[in-house]
Image: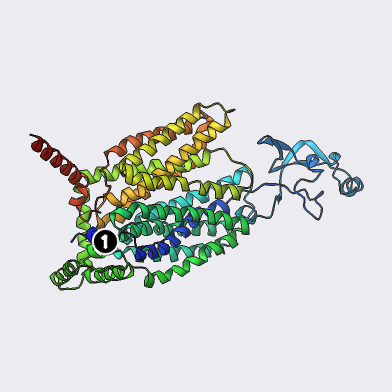
Amino acid sequence: MDLDEILDEVGHFGKFQAINYLLVGFAILLSAAFSLSYVFTAGDLEYRCRIPECEGEEDLFRPDWLQNAVPFEESDYQARPVRCLRFAPRNISTFLAEIYTYNDSACPSGMFDRNNEIQCQSWLYNGEEITIVNEWNITCDENEWKLTLVGTVNNVGQFIGFPLAGLVSDRVGRRTTLVTATVGAGVMGLVRSMAWSYEAFLVFEFLDPVFASGIYTAGFVLSMELVGPRARVLGGTLISFFYCFGEAVLGGIASWLQNWRHLLRVLYAPALLCITYHWFLPESVRWLMAMGKTEEARNIILRAAKRNGVLLSNDTLSKFEMISMAEGKPENPETEAKSTKEVLKQVLRSKILLVRVINCSFCWVTITFVFFGLSLTSVSVGGNKFTNFILVALIELPAYVVFYFAMDRFGRKSTLSASLILSGISSISFAFVPTDMDWLRMLLFLLGKFSITISFTVVYVYTTEMFPTELRHSLLGVCAMVGRIGSMVAPQTPLLERYLESLPLFLFGGMSMLSGVFSLSFPETLNSKLPDTVIEAENIGKKALRTSQRFSTDTTKAWQ
């Protein structure tokens, strides 16, 4: 039975799919906020040494006397107080100290030895924002690794969570995985908001993405399997929109609360509501059919047809009846597990699919590496960091619009390859532009980020279309897991600037162009049915080629 033909009859994207996309989209929105929350919870702050002998009741960050007590340095063309050093106080009598200290709340330079700099014992923070920096005084260069470690631990959690989510999803279903991942991440996030130490915070920073990494992949696969072939690009675009808005929502809430504990509680509490998805969200019909659960699949198809106002043909209904009668017995979990193992063995024995998985994994590494690397090495826009975060998130929307039109017009392979190569050209060109041409440098940077955003969106849809149903989520999880290597390595690229300032950009550009060339070996999946078996996955694109060749032969004969 061709499920794509049934979905074509039910409706590629009707009211039934729209309602379920809203439900899945809400979880995807939360996923975006979860995955980037450490940007604000572990965000660095502006601070300086506290000078106990000089500070007044108001604790001003830049009082008039500050230059007498603290050394300054040039940063972004501005003089800023050094964060962890102060001038040593002079050893003077109590009488003179009282005169210097309390004379009109001033701290004369004579109170300090400007030739002797010492480490701070306590700090004063600029503004009211609270992160783990001022919560546990994670300050100065010797502790900077504790802040960068938060992002690394988060990515390690995703590295482990992606393949686990794939295995669980292909075994117990997309809906169950989505609900478990969302609710589990919600619990981990709420517990993290009550962390009593940096070490406890780090433990739950790891456990959160182990769960949360399954939200996007399970939701994406489920949403792709809810719609027909002609609506897959629309579905992928909508999911990307939800993710983009999730990033913007994170920035807005962080700007409003400016307290890492409150931020986590507001972000993660709504995730507990997703437990209701067990009753409101249908399971993937395609997964149910692959697992032999025909009766449940039939009920969902009938419900979808009713919601979309469609009356299914007798031929379609009879196919379900014939399959149900042919089975005649309940599903056996051991048999299903054995079947899944057999499919995995077939994939490993298949040279075509094995090469495809390796190539796909390299593509994922490149995209995550360049996407996050460009963000880290980009020139700061300046101004309010919360506003900048929201704008950087929303600037991805035009890329998603281009993705929507390009995927169906030019195909998956051409769109992916062209966007990767364009991103590579933009990155390498950026390195040769003079520093005084700010407008051209910014234009090339935005073009590179715009292009790699398209690549990121395409690769998700493309990966789900190239592998068989029983292992679709597992192999997507493997590719996404390997891709996390790119996001883990990206924060280290600024270190390369010590050897050559443009070296990171050459690396981004070279990997993008190489991956763009390799992606040309992928089969074209435009308007192809999702493969349910290994053989179908191997033959993606070949049918269209044979049809084209047969048409060419028939045309030649007709002319003769």
Residue type marked 1: Leu
Q: Nearer the viewer, residue 131 or 25?
A: 25
Quadrant including the C terminus: top left
User: Where's residue 471, x and y in %?
Assistant: 27, 55
**How many C-alpha atoms fall within 10 Å of the one at disc 1: few (<14), some, or many (≥20)?**
many
Q: Position of residue 354 (x, y in %)?
A: 24, 45
| Residue picked out by circle 1 | 7
Residue 386, relative to residue 72: is it above or below?
A: below
- Between 301 and 556, the one lying in front of the other is 556
Expressed as whole percent of the image width and height from the top left, the position of residue 50 reads 74, 49
In the rendered view of the protein, which quadrant contains the N terminus? bottom left
**81 on left or right of 154:** right
Foreground residue among 321 and 48: 321
Q: Is residue 474 visible?
A: no
Look at the picture and state if 371 lies above or below 227: above
Q: Label 1: state its secondary structure.
A: helix
